Image (cartoon, rainbow, N blue to C red):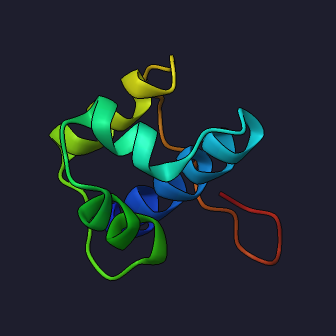
Amino acid sequence: MSPDRMKAEVVLRLIAERRKRKLQAKDVAERCGVSAAAFCKWENGASRPTLDNLFAWAWALGLSLRLTPNQPAVNSAGDA
């Protein structure tokens, strides 16, 4: 998985977690220390949060970001 795809996956998970917790975007933005407009741009894909922003976003939701080993790609024949 490419770095851009990994970041996109993290953003999608953080959006889902915010909604699951029924938190308003403006409230999470405030906890992250950014404007509501900047935060909404992250959520709608108009801009990309930095790694520091991703950590702040996770923290604002009571989550942490962890590194895990990449899964080997599997081709259509099932070989790694």
Relative height, residue 62 to residue 37 (above, below): above
Q: Is residue 40 visible?
A: yes
| Residue for point 50% across, 20% down | 63
| Residue for point 71% across, 73% down | 75
Find residue 64 and report its horizontal and vertical position in percent: 44, 20
Find residue 26 and report its horizontal and vertical position in percent: 42, 49
Give the left or right position of residue 76, taking residue 17 as reference. Answer: right
Q: Residue 57 occupies which quadrant of the picture?
A: top left
Find residue 53 and report its horizontal and vertical position in percent: 22, 43
Give the left or right position of residue 73, taking residue 58 as reference. Answer: right
Relative height, residue 58 to residue 16 (above, below): above
Relative height, residue 15 to residue 69 (above, below): below
Give the left or right position of residue 30, taking residue 23 as reference. Answer: left
Out of 74 and 7, give the one closest to the viewer: 7
For the C terminus, the quadrant is bottom right
Out of 10 and 53, give the one closest to the viewer: 53
| Residue for point 41% across, 26% down | 60
Find residue 28 and report its horizontal and vertical position in percent: 42, 38
